[in-house]
Each structure stands twice: as structure tokens, then as C-alpha cells.
Image (spheres, rainbow, N blue to C red):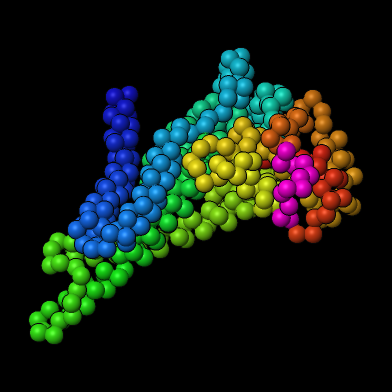
Amino acid sequence: MAPSHVLRCCQRVVGWIPVLFITLVVCWSYYAYVLELCIFTIKSDTEKAIYLVFFHLFFIMFVWSYWKTIFARPASPTKEFCLSKSDKELYEREERQEIQQEILRRAAKDLPIYTTTATKAIRYCERCQLIKPDRCHHCSTCDVCVLKMDHHCPWVNNCVGFSNYKFFLLFLMYSLLYCLFIAATVLQYFIRFWTLCRSKYEESCPQNELPDTRAKFHVLFLFFVSAMFFISILSLFSYHCWLVSKNRSTIEAFRAPYFRTGPEKDGFSLGFSKNLREVFGDEKKYWLLPVFKSLGDGCSFPTRLVFGDPEQNVAAVQADIAKHAGPSQPFPARPLSESQNRLLGSDSHWADGSAGEDHTQKEETRNHVSVCVES
């Protein structure tokens, strides 16, 4: 017990090294830009004031969103997903998998879960001893089941999931803006510095606004570091924007969630605008602020399952629901929460981004919803 406890503590300490590295880089960039560039180098008071105002705006939003991403505690399943004491004892004593699955099906009959593993088994976490809600996965690093888990990010030393996915997206966006602003405003001084360096031994050296001080070193590295981080973050941010537009997590992008009819990679997609609302909320005034406004509870998610032409398959969906209904049915038809009904309802202010979907199709498919993700 003692060695494992010590190892766990060491892992937690080591996990903060990437965060410490980012913090040191940001602190240095603040010092280099504000003091060395704006205060000691730039001579125009107007230019200096404009740069400082915009720099601090991006800096505050970047630090705020980064802080929220790091310290937002990963949302875990509620107690209703844990087995009762008697069911847990039966499950642990039983060695036959089919009987264990029957115990899990009985325990899950009133839970809002609609997905299974690839073998149609109930998704159960042996480590946390609970039935996994849809889109929930166990993080081996955090050693906890995380609702709508996307991935574990070492740069924030935290799991990115339902509780902080919006913060993570804003962190990436403000990181890009922060780096882009620094690189764009430092570029002219960076060019003048290199112009001076190439001809410093010549009598005809062009006049340069940069004094021959340590500011040159900071200007050089400010440009290189900001450009490097901008390029590296741009691809990651673009990828997550695509994930949001499709309403997928990183895990679901690599492994399609299993519905009752099989895997369906677009099973959760409600159209671009509604997918966006699910992450950022209904109130646009909060979209750019790292304030939690995501819709839902993290345990259940609305979805439209479209198999071919919806107008021709409504009866088939109804028949499928009736076919699977029964005392051992692991996919109960639970009512949707208020936020889920808002997402699935027809809203004139939010045009659904699904191609070819008209008002009639929306009305026919509105009540045929379920929730899912594959372990």
C-alpha cells in the first residue's frame, strides 16, 4: 500500500510540471512585452497605450480560461449509477459473465442509458464500481469516471470533459489570439533588430529604434515563441472546432458510439447551431466568457438517429423501440430534461445545420431520441 501511495503522490507532483512550464512562459512573456518592449523600447505613447490595452485584454481572458480549465473539477456520475450494496455483492460473487450482465441490466433498467459496448454489454466500470452513463469514460490518470470525457490534457493537468470543455475551447482560442497579437506587434521590431545585426560593423548602419540593450533578446524570443505556439495550437483548436460542429468528443472521433442498431459516428449531432448551443449554452452574451453554461446534466444527451430517409423509417424506429421494450430492457425511454427538449425542439432562432432537413422531418423525428456513446 505504501509504495503505491508514494508512486501516486509522485505522479501528481510530476503532473504539474507542464502547467508550471506554461505558467513560467506566460509570466516571462508578460515581463518581456510590457516592460522590455512597451515601456523601454516603444517611443510613441499612442502606440504604447494601444498595445498595452489590447495585450492586457487578451492576457486576462487567456489566464482566466486557463485557470478555469485547470481547476474545474471533472464531473463524475451521480450516486444513482452506483450499484446497491446487495447488487454489488451479487456481482462480485458471480463468476459467469452472463449472470453479471443480467445483474447490471436489472440495476440499469431505470437509468438514462442507451448505449452498450461493442458486444452489447452494459458499460460497467470495475474500478469505480458503477454503471457508466452515456459518453462517460474512466480516466486512468485521474482514476475517476468522467462525464462526457474528451481526453486527459497534460498541459492543464486535468481531464477535459463535460464540466470544463467550454473552458478548454476558450483557452485554446484566447491562446491563439494572445500569441497572434504578440507576434504581429513584435514583428516590426524583430525585423529592425535583424537589419541592425547584419550591418552593425558597417558605418552606414541604418538607424534603429531598438536600443542596444537586452530588449533585443526579448524581442527575438517573443516573436519565435509566440509564432511557434500559435502554429502548434492552431491545428488543435481547428480540430476541436470540427468536433464541436459534429458533436463528438475526441474518444468518439476515434471510436464511434454504439447505438442499439450498431455504431453511429454522428449519433449525437443535432445540426451545427444546436451542437454549438449544447457546449456554449443558450445565452450568447456568455459564449466568450469562461462561465459554465453548457446544457444538460452530463449524464444524458439528446440525439436524432436517422437511418436512411426519416420519413420512410419512422415506423421502423417505433417498431424497434417496441421490440426492445421489456422487463430486461437496458434502454429505458426516460423523459428528456428541459435543456434537451429545447435542443431538439424546432426553434426559429436556431437553424439546424443538417443538410436537407426540413420542418416536417424535424417534427417526425423530434420524439424519437436516445442517448449514447461507446466505451
Give the image location of residue 322, x and y in percent: 86, 35
Location of the N terminus by quadrant is top left
Let me know if residue 65 appears in the view.
yes
Residue found 82% across the figure and 48% down from its top: 362
Q: Nearer the viewer, residue 140 or 161?
A: 161
Q: Nearer the viewer, residue 258 or 218?
A: 218
Q: Is residue 374 above or below residue 83?
A: below
**Left or right of 114, for residue 239:** left
**Which residues, given as a range, are shown in magenta?**
342-354
Q: Nearer the viewer, residue 304 or 358?
A: 358
Give the image location of residue 351, x and y in percent: 73, 52
Q: Residue 347 in magenta? A: yes
**Left or right of 257, for residue 54:** left
Q: How many discs mark residues in the rendered view? A: 0
Give the image location of residue 92, x and y in percent: 56, 22
Q: Residue 103 in magenta? A: no
Location of the C terminus by quadrant is top right
Let me know if residue 153 appears in the view.
no
Farthest top residue?
86
Secondary structure that dominates the magenta span: loop
**Left or right of 19, for residue 86:** right
Residue found 27% across the figure and 63% down from its top: 44
Q: Quadrant of residue 125?
A: top right
Q: Is residue 102 above or below residue 50?
A: above
Residue found 73% across the figure and 38% down from its top: 342
Residue found 19% across the figure and 74% down from its top: 208
Q: Is residue 90 above or below residue 114?
A: above
